[in-house]
Amino acid sequence: MNGARYVPLMLGVAACGASEDGRANRIRERTALITPEAFELVDEASDPFDDRPTAPYECKKSGYLAEYLGAEPVFSVRTDDCEYGTFMQPTLVKVYKGEFLNARLWHFTLIASEPAEAHLDVTLAAPGFGMEERLPIPSDGGLVYKTWQAPRDYPAGTPVYFHIHNHGMNEYSLIELSTGTDDPNADP
C-alpha cells in the first residue's frame, strides 16, 4: 500500500458517493509520493528545465544525498558540489483529480559572493505544475511550503522532478511531496 491508509466504509452508502464525472469519491489521508533515496540525477538531454548555466557546470555525486534533517528523512542538494541539477523519481502512488498536493522544502541561510537568485522547482510530470520558487541570495534560511490541487489523475509512476539552480554555497532539502483529499490549509 506504500503508506496509504483508506477510511473503511463503515456506513455503507453514506460513506461513499459518486462525483459529477461518475467516479467514486475517495478519502485518503496524506500519502507520500516520493522517498528521498529514490532520486536520480537527470542527464542534460532529458532535463525538462531550460535555465541551465551558460558556463560549464558539474553536479558531483557528493552534492546530493538522502539524509535526515532532525527526524525527517529528506533529499538534500549541497550547491558547493552541485550548483545546477534536476533530479527525478517516479511517484509511489496514483494522484486523483482534485486531491491536494503538498510540498515542503527547507533551505539554510543563502549566501553568495554577489547578490543572485535561486530557482527551485518541485513538479509532477513537467515544469509548470507544482512548487516553483525564486529566492533572493542572500537571504535567511526558511521553510518553503505550497499546496495545490491536481487538475487530473496522475498514474503511479508519473515523474517527479526536483530542480535546483543556485549561486553560491547553499543547501536545500526536500522534506515532503504528498497527496491526500483533505486541504491542509482549511480551518479545522
Image: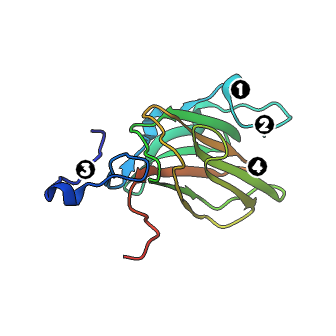
Counting from the top left corner in percent of width and height, residue 124 is at 56, 42
Q: Which residue is denoted by mark 2 in the rendering?
A: 52
At label 2, which amino acid type do we have? Answer: Arg
**Compared with residue 40, is residue 1 higher up or lower down, i.e. above or below?**
below
Question: Of the residues under marks 1 and 4, which one precedes in the sequence?
Answer: 1
The front one of 84 and 29 is 29
At label 4, which amino acid type do we have? Answer: His
Quarter of the image holding residue 187? bottom left
Question: Of the residues under marks 3 and 2, which one precedes in the sequence?
Answer: 3
Label 4, secondary structure: give it: loop
Q: What residue is shown at x 51% (from left), y 44% (from top)?
A: 152
Answer left or right for 98 relative to 162: left
The front one of 13 and 182 is 13
Q: Which residue is denoted by mark 1 in the rendering?
A: 44
Label 4: how many residues lie within 10 Å, few (<14), some (14-19) or many (20+)? Answer: many
Label 3, secondary structure: give it: loop
Q: Which residue is denoted by mark 4 in the rendering?
A: 167
Alpha carbon separation for disc pair 3 and 1: 39 Å
Q: Can residue 39 be seen in this view?
A: no
Question: Of the residues under marks 3 and 4, which one precedes in the sequence?
Answer: 3
Quarter of the image holding residue 30? bottom left
